[in-house]
Amino acid sequence: AQTVTQSQPEMSVQEAETVTLSCTYDTSESNYYLFWYKQPPSRQMILVIRQEAYKQQNATENRFSVNFQKAAKSFSLKISDSQLGDTAMYFCAFIYSGNTPLVFGKGTRLSVIA
Amino acid sequence: SQTIHQWPATLVQPVGSPLSLECTVEGTSNPNLYWYRQAAGRGLQLLFYSVGIGQISSEVPQNLSASRPQDRQFILSSKKLLLSDSGFYLCAWGPRPGQLVGAFFGQGTRLTVV
């Protein structure tokens, strides 16, 4: 079975600083996809960034980037120049090819402090 | 473009009453559809997923059921609600085959069973 672990229940960062959220996963699949979702206080789930396992290049979306280490089964999210609007729950998620659902980690609550 | 609609946004129901939450997707065909539940401050628990009309997979045995009467319609039901059914329910869709680009979520339903 696939599992996703986020070991940091809560984190905080000063505005304009950089923060890294950790995620590890366990799978025997070789081809899969990883995602980071953001859930602000409105509770709307927003897809932040995705990574395909067969791509070695780390994905980047504006201030958000990932550090994908396939051998270590690690998928961390780096947020640069943190903004107050980045305050949210962040969920790491995994899926492998086929008609299977996303498996989520338990989330990390990030607070950006002015 | 694709959109997902989920309603109602909030619901307060007495114990023992029935439940019906509806989710519809526009702008795509034959999507994968999902129901997740989120307890306060917690992660997402997959309840049901569907890869086609009438095809429902249940992840957790419980007081709830799901149906997919039309290609882009997904309904979550209960005949008799329990206090433990309270939570935040999220519907999501993903393109076929498999969620290679991630799942996209509705705005959620906050259910309080009293």
Image (tube, rainbow, N blue to C red):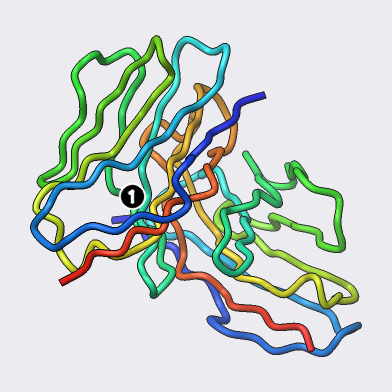
Please provide percent x and percent y for residue A99: 58, 30
Please provide percent x and percent y for residue A69: 33, 17
Q: Nearer the viewer, residue A114 or A69?
A: A114
Quadrant for the C terminus of chain A in the image? bottom left
Q: Nearer the viewer, residue B68 or B114?
A: B114
Q: Mark 1, residues whose alpha carbon is within 10 Å: few (<14), some, or many (≥20)?
A: some
Please provide percent x and percent y for residue A16: 8, 58
Using residue B15 as the reference point, say whether residue B99 is left or right of it: left
Label 1 element class: strand
Disc 1 sits on a residue from what chain? A
Q: Give residue A66's quadrant in the image.
A: top left
User: Residue at the location (57% across, 81% down)?
Assistant: B8
* Residue A72 to residue B79: above or below: above
User: Residue at the location (39% across, 75% down)?
Assistant: A42
User: Residue at the location (47% across, 43% down)?
Assistant: B94
Look at label 1 and name its amino acid. Answer: Leu
Q: Give residue B67's quadrant in the image.
A: bottom right
Using residue B48 as the reference point, say whether residue A80 is left or right of it: left
Q: Nearer the viewer, residue B109 or B38?
A: B38
Q: Which residue is mark 1?
A: A47
Quadrant for the N terminus of chain A in the image? top right
Using residue B57 as the reference point, say whether residue B111 is left or right of it: left
Please provide percent x and percent y for residue A97: 50, 22
* Residue A49 to residue A88: above or below: above
* Residue A26 to residue B98: above or below: above
